[in-house]
Image (tube, rainbow, N blue to C red):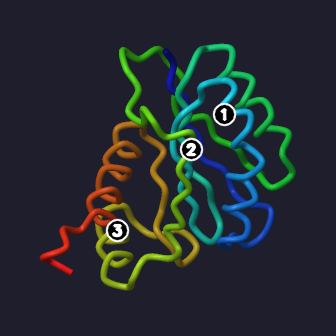
Amino acid sequence: MYRLVYKSRSAGVIDWDTVEAIMHSSEANNDHNEISGTLLASRTHFLQIIEGKYEDVNDTFMRICHDKRHTRIQLIAFHPVDARLFDGWNMKGIGVFDFNQDIEQTMIEKYGTEEQGVKFPLEEWMVLAMVQDISLYLNIPEWKQ
Protein backbone atom coordinates (compact mmCIF):
# COMPACT_ATOMS: atom_id res chain seq x y z
CA MET A 1 0.00 0.00 0.00
CA TYR A 2 1.34 3.43 -1.00
CA ARG A 3 0.35 7.03 -0.36
CA LEU A 4 1.12 9.92 -2.70
CA VAL A 5 0.53 13.59 -1.88
CA TYR A 6 0.87 16.43 -4.37
CA LYS A 7 -0.06 20.08 -4.75
CA SER A 8 -0.71 21.84 -8.04
CA ARG A 9 -1.83 25.20 -9.37
CA SER A 10 -4.98 25.19 -11.43
CA ALA A 11 -4.81 26.36 -15.03
CA GLY A 12 -8.03 28.33 -14.37
CA VAL A 13 -10.32 29.38 -11.56
CA ILE A 14 -11.65 26.39 -9.62
CA ASP A 15 -15.34 26.06 -8.80
CA TRP A 16 -17.67 23.17 -7.99
CA ASP A 17 -18.03 22.33 -11.69
CA THR A 18 -14.25 21.86 -11.92
CA VAL A 19 -14.13 19.65 -8.81
CA GLU A 20 -17.10 17.57 -9.99
CA ALA A 21 -15.57 17.12 -13.46
CA ILE A 22 -12.32 15.84 -11.95
CA MET A 23 -14.20 13.54 -9.58
CA HIS A 24 -16.37 12.19 -12.41
CA SER A 25 -13.42 11.55 -14.75
CA SER A 26 -11.45 9.74 -12.04
CA GLU A 27 -14.34 7.70 -10.61
CA ALA A 28 -14.13 4.70 -12.96
CA ASN A 29 -10.33 4.46 -12.85
CA ASN A 30 -10.20 4.80 -9.08
CA ASP A 31 -12.87 2.17 -8.51
CA HIS A 32 -11.26 -0.31 -10.92
CA ASN A 33 -7.76 0.24 -9.47
CA GLU A 34 -8.90 0.40 -5.82
CA ILE A 35 -7.56 3.95 -5.46
CA SER A 36 -8.76 5.94 -2.45
CA GLY A 37 -8.04 9.42 -1.16
CA THR A 38 -9.20 12.99 -1.12
CA LEU A 39 -8.95 16.04 -3.36
CA LEU A 40 -8.95 19.48 -1.75
CA ALA A 41 -9.52 22.49 -3.97
CA SER A 42 -9.12 26.20 -3.31
CA ARG A 43 -9.95 28.79 -5.98
CA THR A 44 -6.41 28.44 -7.36
CA HIS A 45 -4.83 25.19 -6.13
CA PHE A 46 -5.37 21.46 -5.75
CA LEU A 47 -4.04 19.29 -2.93
CA GLN A 48 -4.57 15.57 -3.32
CA ILE A 49 -3.84 12.42 -1.36
CA ILE A 50 -3.92 9.18 -3.36
CA GLU A 51 -3.70 5.69 -1.81
CA GLY A 52 -3.42 2.26 -3.42
CA LYS A 53 -1.01 -0.21 -4.98
CA TYR A 54 2.30 1.28 -6.14
CA GLU A 55 1.66 0.88 -9.88
CA ASP A 56 -1.90 2.20 -9.67
CA VAL A 57 -0.93 5.24 -7.60
CA ASN A 58 2.03 5.97 -9.90
CA ASP A 59 -0.12 5.60 -13.05
CA THR A 60 -2.77 7.88 -11.56
CA PHE A 61 -0.17 10.52 -10.76
CA MET A 62 1.26 10.29 -14.30
CA ARG A 63 -2.23 10.95 -15.73
CA ILE A 64 -2.58 13.95 -13.43
CA CYS A 65 0.82 15.27 -14.58
CA HIS A 66 -0.49 15.27 -18.17
CA ASP A 67 -3.86 16.81 -17.26
CA LYS A 68 -4.04 20.37 -18.65
CA ARG A 69 -6.07 21.51 -15.61
CA HIS A 70 -2.92 21.22 -13.47
CA THR A 71 0.21 23.39 -13.62
CA ARG A 72 3.23 23.64 -11.30
CA ILE A 73 2.73 20.16 -9.84
CA GLN A 74 4.73 19.61 -6.65
CA LEU A 75 5.24 16.08 -5.31
CA ILE A 76 5.06 16.26 -1.52
CA ALA A 77 5.30 12.56 -0.60
CA PHE A 78 5.24 9.09 -2.15
CA HIS A 79 5.97 6.16 0.15
CA PRO A 80 4.69 2.85 1.51
CA VAL A 81 2.13 2.93 4.32
CA ASP A 82 0.73 0.24 6.61
CA ALA A 83 -2.93 1.10 6.01
CA ARG A 84 -5.20 3.47 4.14
CA LEU A 85 -6.40 6.65 5.79
CA PHE A 86 -9.28 6.87 3.32
CA ASP A 87 -10.56 3.31 3.23
CA GLY A 88 -13.98 3.27 1.60
CA TRP A 89 -13.49 6.61 -0.19
CA ASN A 90 -12.94 6.17 -3.94
CA MET A 91 -12.04 9.84 -3.90
CA LYS A 92 -13.70 12.60 -1.95
CA GLY A 93 -13.70 16.13 -3.35
CA ILE A 94 -13.75 19.05 -0.93
CA GLY A 95 -14.04 22.66 -2.06
CA VAL A 96 -12.18 24.69 0.56
CA PHE A 97 -13.47 27.78 -1.29
CA ASP A 98 -16.98 26.82 -0.15
CA PHE A 99 -16.33 27.05 3.61
CA ASN A 100 -18.10 29.67 5.66
CA GLN A 101 -16.01 32.71 6.61
CA ASP A 102 -15.36 31.59 10.20
CA ILE A 103 -13.95 28.21 9.13
CA GLU A 104 -11.95 29.77 6.31
CA GLN A 105 -10.47 32.37 8.69
CA THR A 106 -9.54 29.65 11.19
CA MET A 107 -7.83 27.67 8.41
CA ILE A 108 -5.95 30.78 7.21
CA GLU A 109 -4.77 31.53 10.77
CA LYS A 110 -3.47 27.96 11.12
CA TYR A 111 -2.07 27.28 7.63
CA GLY A 112 -1.53 30.72 6.10
CA THR A 113 -2.87 32.43 3.00
CA GLU A 114 -2.08 31.99 -0.67
CA GLU A 115 -3.66 34.08 -3.41
CA GLN A 116 -6.49 35.26 -1.12
CA GLY A 117 -7.34 31.73 0.04
CA VAL A 118 -6.22 29.02 2.41
CA LYS A 119 -2.61 27.99 1.75
CA PHE A 120 -2.10 24.30 1.08
CA PRO A 121 1.01 23.06 2.94
CA LEU A 122 4.06 21.39 1.39
CA GLU A 123 4.81 19.03 4.29
CA GLU A 124 2.94 15.73 4.46
CA TRP A 125 2.26 15.91 8.20
CA MET A 126 0.66 19.33 7.74
CA VAL A 127 -1.42 18.06 4.82
CA LEU A 128 -2.72 15.21 6.98
CA ALA A 129 -3.41 17.65 9.84
CA MET A 130 -5.33 19.91 7.44
CA VAL A 131 -7.45 17.01 6.19
CA GLN A 132 -8.17 16.05 9.80
CA ASP A 133 -9.16 19.63 10.63
CA ILE A 134 -11.45 19.80 7.61
CA SER A 135 -13.10 16.48 8.47
CA LEU A 136 -13.81 17.84 11.95
CA TYR A 137 -15.30 21.05 10.51
CA LEU A 138 -17.47 19.10 8.07
CA ASN A 139 -18.73 16.64 10.71
CA ILE A 140 -20.12 19.12 13.21
CA PRO A 141 -22.39 17.31 15.69
CA GLU A 142 -26.06 18.12 15.14
CA TRP A 143 -26.38 19.62 18.64
CA LYS A 144 -23.69 22.22 17.79
CA GLN A 145 -25.27 23.40 14.54
Q: Quick check: marks 1 and 2 in contact, CB under 8 Å?
A: yes
Q: Look at the numbered disc 2 and give the secondary structure of its residue.
A: loop
For the residue pair 73 and 83, the one nearer the viewer reads as: 83
Q: Look at the numbered disc 3 and give the secondary structure of its residue.
A: helix
Residue that extends furthest to the left in the rendered view of this protein: 143
Q: CA distance from mark 3 to mark 2?
A: 22 Å
19 to the left or right of 111: right
In the image, is residue 103 above or below residue 125? below
Q: Position of residue 112 (x, y in %)?
A: 39, 66
In the image, is residue 77 above or below residue 66? above
Q: Residues within 10 Å of mark 3 (few under 14, many from 20)?
A: many
Q: Residues within 10 Å of mark 1 (few under 14, many from 20)?
A: many
In the image, is residue 2 above or below residue 35? above
Q: CA distance from mark 1 to mark 3?
A: 29 Å
111 to the left or right of 118: left
Q: Earlier in the sequence, mark 1 or mark 2?
A: 1
Residue found 34% across the figure and 65% down from its top: 138
Where does label 1 land, which residue? 30
Q: Earlier in the sequence, mark 1 or mark 3?
A: 1
Where does label 3 land, which residue? 107
Residue found 38% across the figure and 50% down from its top: 131
Residue found 49% across the figure and 15% down from its top: 1
Q: Amino acid at mark 2?
A: Met
Q: Position of residue 56 (x, y in %)?
A: 68, 20
Q: Quick check: marks 3 and 2 in contact, CB under 8 Å?
A: no
Report the disc number at residue 91.
2
In the image, is residue 118 above or below residue 99? above
* Quadrant in the picture for residue 54: top right
Q: Amino acid at mark 3?
A: Met
